Image (tube, grey):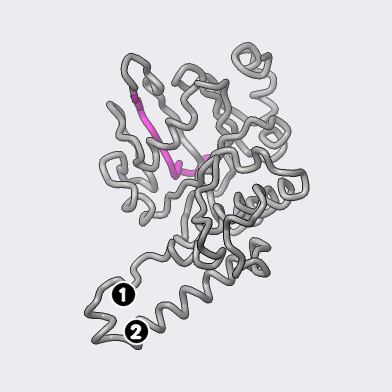
Amino acid sequence: MTSEKPILRAKGLVKAFGGLRALDECTFEVAPRAITGLIGPNGAGKTTLFNTIVGLYTPDAGRIYFAGERVDDIPPWEIVGRGLVKTFQIPRELGNMTVLENLLLWVRGNPGERLWNLALRPLRVREFEREAQRKAEEILRFAGLFELRDEYAKNLSGGQKKILELSRALMSDPTMILLDEPVAGVNPTLTLKILNLIAQLKAQGKTFFLIEHDMDVVMNRCDWIIVMHQGRKLAEGSPKDVKRDERVVEAYLGE
């Protein structure tokens, strides 16, 4: 962990579903401009934690701070507006829309969404839409999907849909991206491409917090690792330290 002030911080998070505490006094920090891995056995609470961070679940107790401001008491769209976004383990593309259209739907603040702007400020609306398309095409070039911009999203391969999911997230100009199993079920070629995209974005100053079960990916690509077990942080450290931690071996890696 770096000496910099954490970009994401959670303290005492609790989230229960009936009698099950998916998060049980969970406390952790994530450093900026780094790739932090989140690992743990199935049922450890990893996806629940991600969904709570981005406001899809409301915590029963505890607090979450992003960039120094509390975010556990605001709706998901406001969290996105502050620069914190999440991709999903199973891509949620709009299959009957093109790749380009999928990105354009992520544009925020379109003046064309207000009828009076269409009537009174048509030039402003057209300029905004031209800029949004330019930005979307630039992201698609970066992600390697530009040649598929007019393809229906449903026709993409599983790996390409994962890249589309990441590309859509980039449309909101995030500071930090939560990735839920970004390479699960992806062939080796596209896995390498996704990991290289993440590395390039990190070099540009983005922060990543990712759930991943592929230990080769976690150990070779993450700067820091947080281990969850039964809804709590069990351990954390560098990949080398986590690999040697007997608690981690017993709870997860040993399985």
In which quarter of the view is residue 242 placed? top right
Measured from the top left, where is residue 70 in percent x and y?
30, 42
Q: Secondary structure at mark 1?
A: helix
Q: Which residues are magenta?
A: 1-15
Residue 194 among those drawn in magenta: no
* Viewer-proximal residue among 165 and 29: 165
Q: Secondary structure at mark 2?
A: helix
Measured from the top left, where is residue 56 in percent x and y?
36, 40
* Viewer-proximal residue among 50 and 153: 153
Please give the name of the residue rendered at 38% of the width and 45% of the height, measured from the top-left corner: 66
Q: Which mark is residue 143?
A: none
Q: Which mark is residue 111?
A: 1
In which quarter of the view is residue 247 placed? top right
Q: Residue furthest right?
A: 189
Whether the residues at callouts 1 and 2 have beta carbons within 8 Å, the answer is: yes
Is residue 100 left or right of 66 when viewed as pictured?
Answer: right
Measured from the top left, where is residue 15 in percent x and y?
34, 25
Please give the name of the residue rendered at 43% of the width and 63% of the height, measured from the top-left corner: 105
Is residue 168 left or right of 212 when viewed as pictured?
Answer: left
Please give the name of the residue rendered at 64% of the width and 30% of the height, measured from the top-left corner: 213
Residue 7 among those drawn in magenta: yes
Q: Which mark is residue 124?
A: 2
